[in-house]
Image (cartoon, helix red, strand yellow):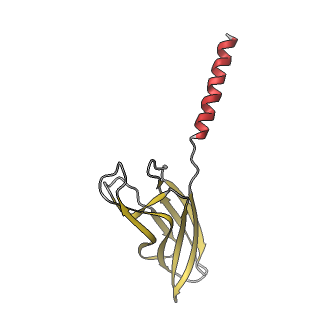
Amino acid sequence: MNMLRSGVLVMVMLLSFAAKGQIVRDPTTWTVETKKTAASTYDVIFHLKLQPMWHIFSLTPGGDGMQLPPEFKVTGAKVKGKVKEKGKLTKGKIEGIDGIVNYYAGNVDYVQSVTGAAGTKVSGSYKYQVCTDEMCLAPKTKTFEVTLK
């Protein structure tokens, strides 16, 4: 009986080490800042830096419709227009996806214009999914808060 328990314990330990090796850390670094563009107009800028081999789909990802574009929710100031993306857009085929997809690797900025008074606190959330050519991580949602300066 003790041999059986010892054997089960060893198997559980080995499986837990194997499972731990499968955890992938978030390969993104996000920073959020504001920039005044006119009297009461500001850009809320979401800077994204991706580790090598990772990409994020464009706001208009193309493909077969299964690709998740990033989403941005901004509260505390009046949103002006849609979010714009700035970076080196890649258009191409990815194995396992029908059609041409649009994505960014390296660095990309997402810019949301807002109107409000200086000193106003702006907050919200952003949701994103990042992938390699072989896998995608589960979508993540993060919150932010910045002050219009």
Percent of width and height locating residue 108: 49, 68
Percent of width and height locating residue 9: 66, 22
Q: Residue furthest bottom?
A: 39
Q: Residue shown at 45%/70% (left/top)?
A: 88
Q: Residue shown at 58%/79% (left/top)?
A: 148
- Say how many tags the image has: 0
Q: Is residue 60 visible?
A: no
Q: From the viewer's perspective, is residue 45 above or below residue 1? A: below
Please identify the quarter of the rendering in which residue 117 is found: bottom right
Q: Residue furthest top?
A: 1
Foreground residue among 31 and 99: 99
Q: State which quarter of the image contains the N terminus.
A: top right
Q: From the viewer's perspective, is residue 76 above or below residue 68? A: below
Foreground residue among 52 and 19: 52
Foreground residue among 108 and 91: 91
Q: From the viewer's perspective, is residue 121 above or below residue 134? A: below
Q: Is residue 81 visible?
A: yes
Percent of width and height locating residue 84: 43, 73
Q: From the viewer's perspective, is residue 35 above or below residue 4? A: below
Percent of width and height locating residue 44: 52, 75
Q: Residue shown at 62%/33% (left/top)?
A: 16
Please identify the quarter of the rendering in which residue 18 is found: top right
Q: State which quarter of the image contains the C terminus.
A: bottom right
